[in-house]
């Protein structure tokens, strides 16, 4: 008896799940252990609580991304997490691009002359990851469709 044809297990662009972790782990860890040391302006008790809660959520998403990374692209859970992370990163990018300065650091006079701020760099990172998730989604639709057809 011959074995059924195999569906590609992991698309190379699935590395975007690891890219999400690389972008988010620093804020998650520092926000959980020492939110006061984050370089943000006007931290109050309320904002510190929200930073801790946000950090816990982000840490949970990093764990989920790490667990989903090796799984096949056609699994509904992986696709759902990928879509959720796409939405999250695109939304964060938009928020950071429209935010007033809240990180009291500079990237130097040259960067400042081009209006390049830490908020914009962080927002660009989120935008790249969000766009990468959208590309991953589109490039793996065929794998998911093929897997679905094989189960019918």
Image (tube, rainbow, N blue to C red):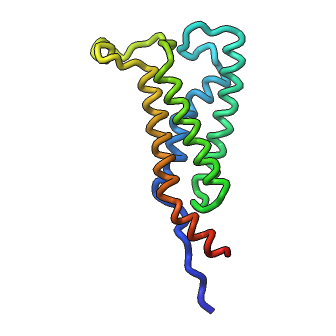
Image coordinates for residue 16, horizontal then vertical, percent: 50, 47
In this rendering, position of residue 127 left or right of residue 28? left
Say above or below: 109 vs 121: above
Q: Quadrant of residue 27?
A: top right
Say above or below: 128 vs 30: below
Residue at 29%, 13% in the rendered image:
113
Q: Which of these two is toward me, 74 or 23?
A: 74
Residue at the bottom extreme of this rendering: 1
Q: Quadrant of residue 76?
A: bottom right
Q: Which of these two is toward me, 99 or 44?
A: 99
Q: How many numbered marks appear?
A: 0
Q: Which of these two is toward me, 74 or 27?
A: 74
In this rendering, position of residue 135 left or right of residue 49? left
Residue at 51%, 13% in the rendered image:
102
Image coordinates for residue 69, horizontal then vertical, percent: 58, 53
Residue at 62%, 40% in the rendered image:
62
Quarter of the image with the C terminus is bottom right
Image coordinates for residue 98, horizontal then vertical, percent: 48, 20
Q: Which of these two is toward me, 151 or 105?
A: 151
Image coordinates for residue 87, horizontal then vertical, percent: 57, 39
Say above or below: 144 vs 17: below
Residue at 52%, 53% in the rendered image:
137
Say above or below: 99 vs 148: above
Quarter of the image with the N terminus is bottom right
């Amino acid at each position: 008896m011959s074995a059924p044809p195999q569906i590609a297990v992991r698309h190379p662009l699935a590395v975007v799940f690891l890219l999400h972790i690389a972008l988010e782990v620093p804020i998650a860890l520092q926000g959980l252990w020492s939110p006061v040391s984050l370089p943000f302006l006007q931290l109050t008790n309320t904002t510190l609580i929200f930073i801790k809660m946000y950090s816990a959520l982000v840490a949970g998403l990093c764990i989920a991304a790490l667990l989903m990374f090796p799984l096949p692209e056609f699994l509904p859970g992986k696709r759902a997490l990928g879509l959720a992370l796409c939405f999250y990163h695109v939304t964060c990018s938009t928020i950071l691009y429209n935010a007033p300065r809240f990180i009291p650091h500079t990237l130097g006079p040259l960067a400042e002359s081009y209006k390049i701020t830490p908020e914009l760099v962080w927002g660009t990172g989120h935008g790249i990851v969000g766009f990468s998730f959208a590309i991953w989604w589109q490039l793996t639709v065929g794998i998911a469709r093929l897997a679905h057809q094989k189960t019918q």
